[in-house]
Image (spheres, rainbow, N blue to C red):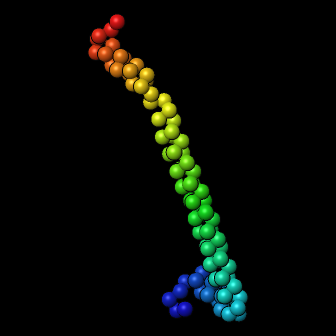
Amino acid sequence: MQFCDEEQTATLETYLAMTAAERKKIVDDADKAAADIMEKFEEDAAKLNARYAEMKVEKEAFKKSVNTKELKLLKSIRGGELLGRQR
């Protein structure tokens, strides 16, 4: 403790005054909290990934439903109009 400042020394003395079981409980509680937040993160990430996959399917289905032969024809007519071939 000779290389510690006053704050570090006070913190060490506080922990050294505790029993080994008390120190273990602090560490175990912190480890459990970290594990819980990681579990929640993984669950939420899985939900997001599932929703993203659903949205991709929905997007492709929508694109397929609107990309009809008629729309392609209209786009080609419009393309001609933009090139100056109006009717």
In the picture, measured across the screen, residue 60 lies left or right of residue 83, that is right
In the picture, measured across the screen, residue 7 lies left or right of residue 81, that is right
> Is residue 42 placed above or below 20 in the rendered structure?
above
> Is residue 63 placed above or below 86 in the rendered structure?
below
Residue 35 in view:
yes
State the quadrant of the N terminus.
bottom right
In the picture, measured across the screen, residue 20 lies left or right of residue 46, that is right
Q: Position of residue 16 (x, y in %)?
A: 65, 92
In the picture, measured across the screen, residue 83 lies left or right of residue 50, that is left
State the quadrant of the C terminus.
top left
> Is residue 52 placed above or below 39 in the rendered structure?
above
- Residue positioned 64% across, 83% down in the render: 27
Where is residue 47, by image quadrant?
bottom right
- Residue positioned 57% across, 51% down in the render: 51
Which is more toward the observer, 86 or 37? 86
Which is more toward the observer, 84 or 10? 84
- Residue positioned 64% across, 71% down in the render: 36
Residue 82 in view:
no
Q: Position of residue 17 (x, y in %)?
A: 69, 92
Residue most toward the top? 87
- Residue positioned 62% across, 78% down in the render: 31
Which is more toward the observer, 30 or 75? 75
Q: Position of residue 43 (x, y in %)?
A: 61, 63
Where is residue 20, by image quadrant?
bottom right
Q: Position of residue 10 (x, y in %)?
A: 63, 85
Numbered label tally: 0
